[in-house]
Image (cartoon, rainbow, N blue to C red):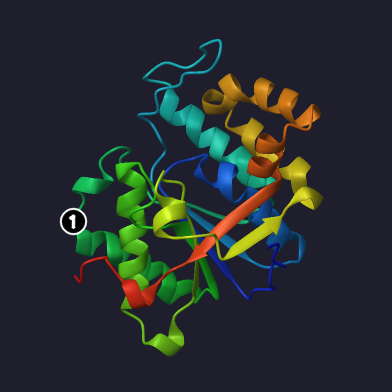
């Protein structure tokens, strides 16, 4: 069932890598910005260990961090994100960071921004170790707040067991009004997306239903506090 995107006071988006925002939530971000809602994007790493170096390759292991930093800025500009935070953690190491330190990082953002909505990954359903570490930190930081002061959590889930273990998404947004901004954000991350953009655009032109559903609709789950599996700090 399609859901209307609610008006928010302040949105905080927290993901570990440049391009995490582009695939699953860039249409939602663009919609909030179109309404004048402040959006802060805290990107924890520069994705400097990403496997893709462009297609054809134009990056090297040495140049990739600066390239991905520039791509992240370009994506933020495409989505009109005015407050981009590069948090300076190292790619592919978040699972080894101290849990308390990670939650403190998120708690500091919550205290400063007092967001009405936080967008991130759903713990246990985010596949990549950096995604999972980020998701756990977000839930732990929000859990520290009194229930009446907690922001809404709208979380992205895409593990193979999502439908069976979490069920249908709680929120499904039609982002066709801001489709061009979403595509601009995907193109901004060209070192990582070149390999799939041409095929994606062809399938969209052909109105391939699977591709249309994946790109034109963004899905979120509310955190199940009554089934909280993230261990206490």
Instruction: State which quadrant residue 10 falls in.
Output: bottom right
- Left or right: 167 with respect to 195? left
Q: Position of residue 11 (x, y in %)?
A: 57, 67
Give the structural element (helix, strand or loop) at label 1. loop
Above-or-below relation of 130 to 37: above
The residue furthest top is 56
Q: Position of residue 114 (x, y in %)?
A: 49, 77
The residue under the point 60% across, 64% down is 171
Instruction: Give the total number of marks visible in the rendering.
Output: 1
Q: Which residue is mark 1?
A: 98
- Residue 43 visible to an observer of this rendering: no
Q: Position of residue 77 (x, y in %)?
A: 67, 45
Q: Residues within 10 Å of mark 1 (few under 14, many from 20)?
A: few
Instruction: State which quadrant residue 227 falls in.
Output: bottom left
The residue under the point 31% across, 71% down is 228
The residue furthest front is 164
- Residue 82 visible to an observer of this rendering: yes
- Left or right: 146 with respect to 33? left
The residue under the point 54% across, 71% down is 117
Instruction: State which quadrant residue 70 falls in.
Output: top right
Q: Point out the image quarter for the C terminus.
A: bottom left
Above-or-below relation of 12 to 180: below
Q: Point out the image quarter for the N terminus.
A: bottom right
């Amino acid at each position: 069932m399609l859901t209307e995107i609610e008006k928010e006071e302040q949105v905080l988006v927290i993901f570990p890598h440049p391009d995490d925002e582009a695939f699953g939530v860039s249409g939602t971000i663009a919609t909030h910005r179109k309404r004048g809602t402040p959006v802060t994007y805290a990107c924890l790493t520069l994705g400097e260990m990403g496997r893709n170096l462009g297609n054809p390759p134009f990056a090297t292991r040495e140049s990739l961090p600066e390239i991905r930093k520039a791509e992240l800025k370009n994506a933020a500009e495409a989505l009109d994100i005015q407050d981009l935070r590069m948090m300076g953690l190292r790619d592919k190491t978040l699972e080894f960071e101290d849990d308390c330190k990670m939650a403190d990082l998120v708690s500091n953002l919550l205290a400063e921004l007092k967001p009405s909505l936080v967008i991130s990954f759903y713990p246990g359903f985010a596949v990549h170790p950096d995604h999972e570490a980020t998701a756990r930190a977000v839930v732990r930081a929000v859990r520290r707040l009194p229930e009446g002061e907690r922001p809404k959590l709208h979380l992205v889930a895409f593990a193979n067991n999502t439908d069976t273990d979490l069920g249908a998404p709680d929120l499904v947004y039609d982002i066709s009004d801001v489709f061009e901004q979403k595509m601009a954000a995907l193109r901004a991350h060209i070192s990582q997306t070149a390999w799939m953009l041409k095929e994606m655009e062809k399938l969209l032109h052909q109105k391939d239903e699977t591709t249309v559903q994946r790109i034109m609709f963004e899905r979120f789950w509310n955190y199940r506090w009554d089934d909280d599996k993230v261990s206490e700090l």
